Each structure stands twice: as structure tokens, then as C-alpha cells.
Amino acid sequence: MPLAAAIRESVDILLFALGDDLSATESGAAIDDAMVRSALGQLATNAKGKFTADAPKLLVVPPTQLKNVWNIPAIKEYQIRGTVGSAVNAQMNAYGLVWRESGNVLNSGGSYYNPLLLKDAWALAWNEKPHILDEQVDGLGFALISYAEFGAAEWFDSSGVALVIT
């Protein structure tokens, strides 16, 4: 359903716009093994007890960084031995992270702000979940109308690190 996908995409855009507000950052020309390990170290230090082996951790990267991500040794090894991280479905899990690709990662001033997050870094609240109304017929044409009401905000700054790619 393309209309529902457009609504979900608008939620991503709003959330990823919070990426440049994160206090903790790691900067570089491309995402690499050292940058990810350093960002995880910052996240562990800042988030304190919330950073555990079992805590879900998410790193979102733009499509332009996938070639660099796939060159990280832990990802290559996981693609060979892992169950989720096969090269066929492009799902990756290394360093206890869930890696997600999105074309909606914030690009501001020529820098991408790739968020590395614990679950409580950002809050998303729905007033109205996405709805698609019935077709609105008007003469020979029709209109498709959808709507959603939601808000997003930074919840715990300590639960996120921005990997800034210039």
C-alpha cells in the first residue's frame, strides 16, 4: 500500500531529524569498524545501566554507506555464519546492533547524522494512528485521503550517539 508507506516514511523523516540534536557524536568520512566501536563505547558510558548485552540497539545508515558497512569485518563474518545477517536479505546484526538502511537519514549541510540508539532515546506518540479513508469519488475522478497525528521528541539524550559522516 503506497499511501501507508508514505505515512510511515514521514514518521522516519521526523524522527531522524532529531539526529543532529544528539550530544554525543563520532565523526568521520565513512562508517567503519573503529567508528562503530567508538560510538558503542560512548553509548555504554553515557547510558550507564541501560546499556546491556540484551538491550536492543539500532544503527541507521543511508544507502550511500552500505558499501562501507558491508566491509566491516564483524558484518562479513556474520553474513557467513549468522542466521539473520545473510547477504541475500541484507539484514545485519553485528556488535549486538540491528543495522537498518534508510534513505531518510538526516542530511544537513553535507553531513549525514546516522543515529545509534537505545530504545528510549527518542519518543514517538500517536494521537491518531495512520488511517486511509474510503475513496472520495468526485465526478470522473477520485481522491485517496490518509492522515495521522503524531509527535516525536528526544527522550533521553544519553541513549543516543550520532555517527556524523561528512
Image: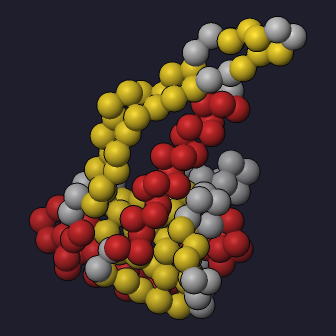
- Viewer-closest of 87 and 15: 15
Q: Is residue 9 above or below residue 41?
A: above
Q: Position of residue 156 (x, y in %)?
A: 21, 63
Q: Position of residue 10 (x, y in %)?
A: 54, 46
Q: Is residue 48 above or below residue 132?
A: below
- Viewer-closest of 25 and 32: 25
Question: Residue 87 is drawn in which quadrant?
Answer: bottom right
Which corner quadrant holds the N terminus?
top right
Q: Position of residue 139 (x, y in %)?
A: 82, 8
Q: Is residue 83 above or below residue 101?
A: above
The residue depicted at 49 percent of the width and 71 percent of the height is 114
Q: Of all residues shown, which one is farthest toward the bottom?
A: 28
Report the side of 97 relative to 112 (left or right): left
Residue 156 in sight: yes
User: Exactly how many numbered labels are in the figure?
Assistant: 0
Report the side of 109 relative to 18 (left or right): right
Question: Residue 40 is drawn in which quadrant?
Answer: bottom left
